[in-house]
Image (spheres, rainbow, N blue to C red):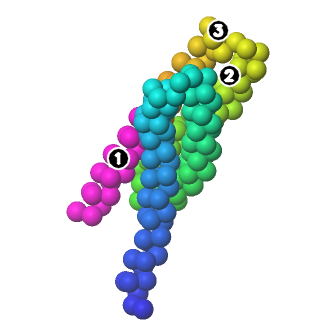
Amino acid sequence: MSSPVRARLRDWGPVALEQLLTVVWLGSLWTVGYLVAPVLFATLPERALAGQVAGRLFTLVAWLGLGCGAALLALALWRWRRAQASLTLVLLPALMLLLVLTGEFGLQPRMAELKALGESGGAMFARLHGIAALLYLAESLLGLGWLVLRVRETLRRAA
């Protein structure tokens, strides 16, 4: 195998992995948050059941985000150290990871505690739920921003 072909294959691996991780993380984030959860609440007869299912799905999305986000951050750092990525493309997945960690390990345990106490209809639960929704929206928008910047950077390098 010739050297240029070998070099292209070597560079293709991280790109393919990054694309796969991006599809899994952002795809699950957007699909569950903006398609599945609203459909659950619109179609299931009991809001409590819809909330249980949605909560479980959001937990799965968070764990996917932690895994995919850590790997994307590692790839972004690797690309940045090789002068192939801007610092912004490193900071965005880092911020997204911080939001996932805050939601899953900061807010969710307290919300689960309030549910267990039968206070899921109370003001504190509503406040925490609102904060969690804002964090989720921020993560979604940061993901969109990261995707747009990553595509622009790829197109710029190809030109």
Q: Secondary structure at mark 1?
A: helix
Left or right of 102 in this view: 44 = left
Where does the image place residue 159, in percent across and percent down from the top left?
A: 22, 63
For the residues labelled 3 and 2, say whether their Cβ atoms are less than 8 Å apart.
Answer: no
Q: Amino acid at mark 2?
A: Met
Where does the image place residue 53, in percent across and percent down from the top left?
A: 60, 34
Q: Which residue is mark 1?
A: 149
Q: Amino acid at mark 1?
A: Leu
Q: Residue at x 29, y 51 (%)?
A: 152
Task: From this view, report whether residue 64 is shown above or below residue 113.
Answer: below
Q: Which residue is mark 2?
A: 111
Q: Say few, some or many: other residues with alpha carbon within 10 Å of mark 1 (under 14 / 14 to 19 / 20 or more).
A: some
Q: Which residue is mark 3?
A: 122
Q: Say few, some or many: other residues with alpha carbon within 10 Å of mark 3 (under 14 / 14 to 19 / 20 or more).
A: few
Q: Secondary structure at mark 3?
A: loop
Q: Residue at x 56, y 51 (%)?
A: 68
Identify the magenta region. Answer: 140-159
For the residues labelled 1 and 3, say whether their Cβ atoms are less than 8 Å apart.
Answer: no
For the residues labelled 1 and 2, say whether their Cβ atoms are less than 8 Å apart.
Answer: no
Q: Quadrant of the N terminus?
A: bottom left
